[in-house]
Amino acid sequence: MAAKNTKSTKKKGEDGDPLAEYRRKRDAGKTPEPVPADEDALPRGENDTFVIQEHHARSLHWDLRLERDGVLVSWAVPKGIPPSPKVNHLAVHTEDHPLEYATFEGDIPRGEYGAGTMTIWDRGRYETEKWSEREVMIVLHGSRVSGKYVLFRTRGKNWMIHRMDPPADPDAEPLPERLRPMRAAEGRRLPRDQSAHGFEFAWGGRRLLAYISGGRTRFTDGRAGEVGGPAGLGSKLGEALGARPALLDGELAQVEGRETYLIFDLLHLDGHPLLDLPYEERRGRLDELELSGPRWQTTPWFPGDGDAVRQAARDQGLPGMLAKRLDSPYTPGEENDAWRYIPVK
């Protein structure tokens, strides 16, 4: 291991207290966060503890905290810790936190600094290879993140974080830039072999694919053109998946008088395309994500029960239904009889 540079990036307040800024921003009577009374209350460690906290504040981000000289030196990372050396992520240097913060999870009340939900995303031990005012090189040993990283200062409080090791998952692929959705062929009758199909409602909405990465979402339409989603939908949907990259297929439709994104397929997850998997398996993985919120819902599907779905669609005043072969892969941009749209009126 390289010799350690013991110079710290943290700066003490005018009174010599490294947590002066932290205390100034928080009211111990209102927030559940740990607020030590004074510097003497700080426990002393071995400068080897790290924690990454997922912070659902005004905007979702991840807080990387490294134990150093009796405090947690902290960076806010808007898009999370990069899993590959091919991309660097912004890391904003924030105030030092007390060591007790390494175990904190909870809800910071509205109106307080950093209001929102804080959960521990990963934690473990780390080794220091270099530590200076402008560069911090470390090796993380966590349950979710392991490997060599460097944080380097670019301007003011803005730093970047770069993975120096090979990708954590060498087979991972980035989300596609744009994908044309698979289209259903139109028919008038239910398939004869209903047991080989899954059935869904057709909602009569606008087709949208949602590309989610680092807690952020972008949308493309049925022609793969970039479009803006309804205000607030993209950020909240992104927060629901957190650090997990995913590509969803769905439609934007009116449900009980509210515009809702109805999700019916999962095309990419955690760095792996799912297009070649059978429809039944993709739907199973989508259901496991439990995506349900005020502006988005995972739609129901019903294996082998087409007659009941057709009658339910009529009863609800929906325009149609879809019959999808359980073994069908997803063929982008194609109209395929493996998916059949059946009007019900």
Image: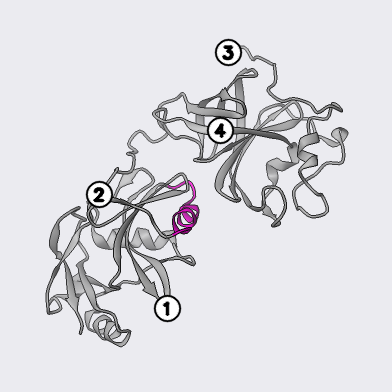
The residue singled out by tag 3 in the image is: 2
Which of 180 and 38 lies nearest the eye of the viewer? 180
- Residue type (three-letter) at the residue carrying disc 4: Ala
The residue singled out by tag 4 in the image is: 91
Q: Is residue 105 left or right of residue 223?
A: right
Classify mark 4: helix, strand or loop: strand
Quick one: label 3 or label 4, which is nearer the N terminus?
A: 3
Q: Residue 179: where, in percent of width, then height?
A: 25, 49
Residue depicted at 44% across the width and 35% down the height: 83
Which of discs 3 and 2 lies nearer the camera? The answer is: 2
Mark pair 3, 4: CA separation: 24 Å
The answer to whether residue 262 is magenta is no
Q: Residues within 10 Å of mark 4 (few under 14, many from 20)?
A: many
Mark pair 1, 3: CA separation: 62 Å
Residue range highlighted in magenta: 231-244
Q: Residue 271: where, in percent of width, then height?
A: 36, 43
- Residue type (three-letter) at the residue carrying disc 1: Glu
The residue singled out by tag 2 in the image is: 179
Q: Residue 193: where, in percent of width, then height?
A: 14, 75
Which of 178 and 130 lies nearest the eye of the viewer? 178
The residue singled out by tag 1 in the image is: 256
The mark total stands at 4
Mark pair 2, 4: CA separation: 30 Å
Which of discs 3 and 4 lies nearer the camera? The answer is: 4
